[in-house]
Image (cartoon, helix red, strand yellow):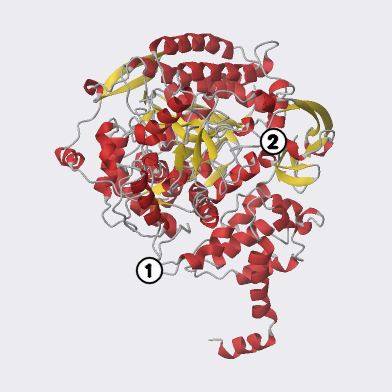
Amino acid sequence: MHSGTTTSEAKVRNAKMKVYRGEGKDGSFKSYTVPVEAGMVVLDAIHYIQREIDPDLAVRWNCKAAKCGSCSAEVNGRPSLMCKTRMEGFAEDQEIEVQPLQTFPIIRDLVCDVSWNFEQNKRIKPFTPKPDADWTIYQEDIERVQEFRKCIECFLCQNVCHILRENDRKDAFVGPRFMIRVAGLEMHPLDSADRLEWLHEEGGVGMCNITKCCTEVCPEDIHITDNGIIPMKERIVDEYYDPVAKFLKRVFRR
Amino acid sequence: MSNYETIETDILVIGAGGAGLRAAVEASAKGMKVALVTKSLLGKAHTVMAEGGIAAAMATVDSRDGWQTHFRDTMIGGKYLNNWRMAQLHAMEAPECVVELEKWGAVFDRTKDGKILQRAFGGHTYKRLCHVGDRTGLELIRTLQDKGVHSGIDVYMECTISRILKDGDKVSGAFGYFREDGRYVLFRAKAIILATGGVGRAFPVTSNSWEYTADGHSLAYDSGADLIDMEFVQFHPTGMVWPPGVRGILVTEAVRGEGGKLTNSEGKRFMFDYLPPQLRQDYAADEKESENWVNDTLSGKLKTDYRRPPELSTRDNVARAIYTEVKAGRGSPHGGVFLDISYQPGDRVKKKLPSMYHQFKDLADVDITKGPMEVGPTMHYIMGGIRVDADTAESKVPGLFAAGECSGGMHGANRLGGNSLSDLIVFGRRAGRGAVAYASNISELSKISEAEIKEAIAELEEPMTRDKGANPYDLQKRMHEITHSGFGIFREEADIKKGLEDLEKLKEEIKTVRCGGGRRYNPGWHLCRDLRNMAIAAEAIGRSALSRKESRGAHSRLDYPETDESLSHENSSVWKEGDKMQLAKTALPEMPAELKEILKKKEVAHA
């Protein structure tokens, strides 16, 4: 459709790649050599391998535009969206190692089973608008909520969270993604449900020790800890641990 | 023979984008047992990539708007080839469907007085697109997803359906496999709703995700439904052109809606020269008026008395203009044209177009607040699809319903931006209701033929059991060459015929395609199936394009450059007979007098 690229930009170099291949934990890394075009991303390199070398290389992807959050993987140890990780970001002689997210069970090659995350969402009390709401909402009251709703569910934050990754406490903590899901509901100006008790007792907000690893890997630049988790932790403290509030609550409880 | 599991349900929804989710929520709310199948993970469907907004005549920004104007804009945009009843229902019901989304938790951008903000888009007379920055599709899908998980819908993720099963004339179920491990699955259902989206992966440069492999189009075609208007393939005027890996990725029309200017290598704003004469008076006379319009928009003024910039012409027209400029040697360095929003304050650009800002910064090293983008046409949408009844969304096959991009008729010869997301929620809801009404009259599940299941499994396994055969990725490349040279943005008889001939050869090779590996998450195997489906869509596009000897909307024939009024009342329609694709012209339904009156009325565009 468009006339081609100019020749100076068509200069080709080869990149050395190591890609995890195999089922479950039994796989191993396989080496590939991939020609690098200008502007190429890691997902392009994976597609090159599929097309030219190993047609059955398993990878999950959808939009290739950093909007769907499907192609999450660990590239040289860094949790990334493969569709926005540029090959030019690596030194020419640097080997590029791609492996699936390590916090979830590996299905095959770069694909892992993230279904646990979808189960967590079901546990969260849905949006419950006030029955008498007139639906006048001001922009300044929803900026924060809109920030949280940018989440594309790539689960990179879930992948790096220590509670889920090193401590494997999926039984006790729903993870940063669902912390901001709850925060988005709690801060919605017209929501009337109360999720504090659930956050405290089942969601596991207290387990987060604010290392901010989640915020660091978020491709949507959501301030997961500062804007989402910390304000909710503060509300929990007020509700459950502040002696004055506790006293007043007891006195005025109907 | 391989084993398979059986799942019984009332209504099976295939596809979990906006239309499928909305249909599932509706059917479930009416007390039906609903199974929702998606090829991807939930919430990843192509809807997520929709950027600019949902068109609905809410009149929150411009009180002059109403469903009649939206209806008229849609019909004019579709060059009067739309199914009038669908266009009417769509315009009338879109506002209530948006309100519904808000009540389910969607958080739209607001006007200063706290209402839903609406922005300008090509072909819409007034500011009409409800939006959330430039990530409206994500908001829509997440809202429906969150609503859906609390509605008792059974969701089956990463599952591909390979055939619809019938008992006599009517549907009885569907057969497919889970991508994760290749295990087979039979769904038994009273009614089936197809909501599988489009066909973009049959084209080399497309804004569509990998899922868009014509599954619904081909499932319906194989089960005896008609596909209409398949010659109408929309090329979005603005896709990224560089770097090569991102070529085709969408650059939202909202850039132009917010005042983005298109220029060629000579710095000329060429769109002033490409406006169709009969619509010339709807657009700014010159750069000065255009600038006044933008200033009114920037100042947050709700109504403006200036006319919109020429960049907001309909998509078919802008795409042709860009293509023509590039062909004439006035393109940008990488074969596109320039789209510039950098003359506006950087903070505003980042606020209104955050994904575009990041997309260009991360993928192309271009800061759109500092300089222009390079853009060119990209295959974006197919107007054609499964012929359905406007009110119930039912196809010719009893019990088989369709909604969203895989259905046809709503958009005629060219879809207006923003009319897709509204289409999903309006007709997703209607398909849900239609399927519920149908299923309510059926007391028990129909029987399934074991022989047919055996056949379905054999068909799926063939590529894995062959000793030799073509590589599926090579065949996909060949498919791209065919659609690109034969069925692209400008067409002519010889090229289309050549494309169809090559396609016949390709179809034979697809029958002998071979993949290595096993059934567990094997993309090569998945592609073997996709190729077959995309070939059906490509053939339907080619045959329909050959038969329409005129230029209209998104269908541009170099050998028939004019619109032929005598062809204004017929759809191209294809269906399957034996192993062959048949084509006929079918008459458009007659529009009632009161709607004809609406079309006659003239309003000056102010958005």
Q: Position of residue A97 (x, y in %)?
A: 81, 37
Q: Residues within 10 Å of mark 2 (few under 14, many from 20)?
A: many
User: Does residue B272 sit above or below B484 in this rendering?
Assistant: below
B283 or A218: nearer the eye? B283
Q: Which mark is residue A134?
A: 1
B592 or B330: nearer the eye? B330
Give me the residue at 54% from left, 52% from top.
Answer: B149
The secondary element bearing badge 2 is classed as loop
Indicate the amino acid at tag 1.
Asp
Give me the residue at 53% from left, 54% from top.
Answer: B146
For disc 2, the chain is A
Q: Position of residue B500 (x, y in %)?
A: 46, 12
Q: Position of residue B577 (x, y in %)?
A: 39, 14
Task: Give the quadrant of the N terminus of chain B.
Answer: top right
Q: Is residue B315 visible?
A: no
Marks 2/1: CA–CA distance: 47 Å
